Image (cartoon, grey):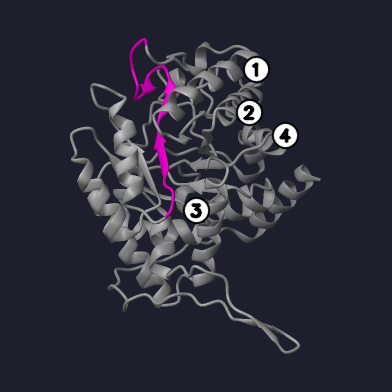
Amino acid sequence: MRLFRIFIIVLLFAAAGVGFYLYEDTKLPPQAQPLRPAATTTGSVTTPPPEPEVTLEEMVGELFMVGHWAETPVASTSELIDTYHLGSVVIMSVPEDPTEIRSWVRTWNASSTRPLFIAIDQEGGSVSRLKGPTFIQTSQREIISTSSAYQVGLVRGKELEKLGINLNLAPVLDYASTTDSFMYQRSFASRELTADMAGAMIAGMSESGVIGVAKHFPGHADTTEDSHVVLPSVPITLEALPAFTSSFEKLIAEYEVAAVMTAHVQFPQIDTQPATLSYFFLTNYLRDGLGFDGVIITDDLIMQAVSSSTPAGQAAVPALQAGADVLMFAAEPARVGEGVTAVLAAVAQGRLSEARIKESYERIQNAKGLVE
């Protein structure tokens, strides 16, 4: 049934083509007002709306994730959290004594009215923020079985949870067989076992109280093109897409996956937009076709693959229109205000609905409930 649904989507979009959103600079809208759910009446008894109320401004802030670097004062990130009601922080570099991260997390959570997602890139191997013998360094390419994938996930999850980290931006499902590929050292060695090993690793982290994030959907090509500096292009047709995304399809169908991260990759024969900003890829394909109902997190909107053509603040709007839930501002966290401003303006102008904001807000709260 899932393959049939994907096939139907492929046929529809092959026939009709895929549109994309236009957007422009906007001004900050008037002060956001609380969303007030209507009271319900049964006979002569009126039930008041649920409490506490959450303002639109608070819900919008929950959708943003900012980066924190070891050399940045912890108070600076706390100020961003408090000012914009942010929902997530991703740790980009760590202190000499990693146990200091526990103090960071306590400080940040004290600045927020809701529990935060505290994220990190701890893939193992070349992409590991936490280095040294204290932390398991096994890379995905070194993992050759689901049992070892589970154990690595379990141990890695325990290490992160002890520091207050509850979201790991791993595992990688992109596949690369060329040794000079951008993703070679970060991917599993077996394409056939990628979904199962990723699912086992996610299960191990979940057992330890950490959510694993499957990335980067729909996948990078086996190429040297690095989306941190350029917009990679994958020259496949719509008909070839199910085979290209088969690992994601199997993972979502057979395992508990709470979050997926997008790829800043363009598929020019399918959509003119990068996948991160594509309604087809995030909504029509990932949600409707593959049946994914968890949290969709963008890769860093500051990366050149997106920001070279769309300023990061503006990109927050089409990312939400496409179907993303969490908008990442990692490399330049101070610019998160641009994104918040753009999203609030889009709601005020009717380009985004309050219902759409609430949809992502509730997905994020549901996911946070898994690690509270």
**Which callout, 4 or 2, points at the residue further toward the start of the chain?**
2
SS of the residue under disc 2: helix
Compare residues 17 and 302 and report the one nearer the observer: 302
Q: Which residues are magenta?
A: 114-133
Residue kind at label 3, given as amino acid type: Ala
Name the residue tied to disc 3: 324
- The single residue placed furthest to the bottom in the displayed view is 44
Residue kind at label 1, given as amino acid type: Thr
Residue kind at label 2, given as amino acid type: Gly
The residues tagged by marks 4 and 1 sit, at their Cα atoms, a distance apart of 14 Å
Name the residue tied to disc 1: 146
The quadrant in which residue 315 appears is bottom left
Name the residue tied to disc 4: 254
The residues tagged by marks 3 and 1 sit, at their Cα atoms, a distance apart of 30 Å
Asked whether residue 311 is in view, the answer is: no
Would residue 156 appear left or right of 106 to someone viewing this image? right
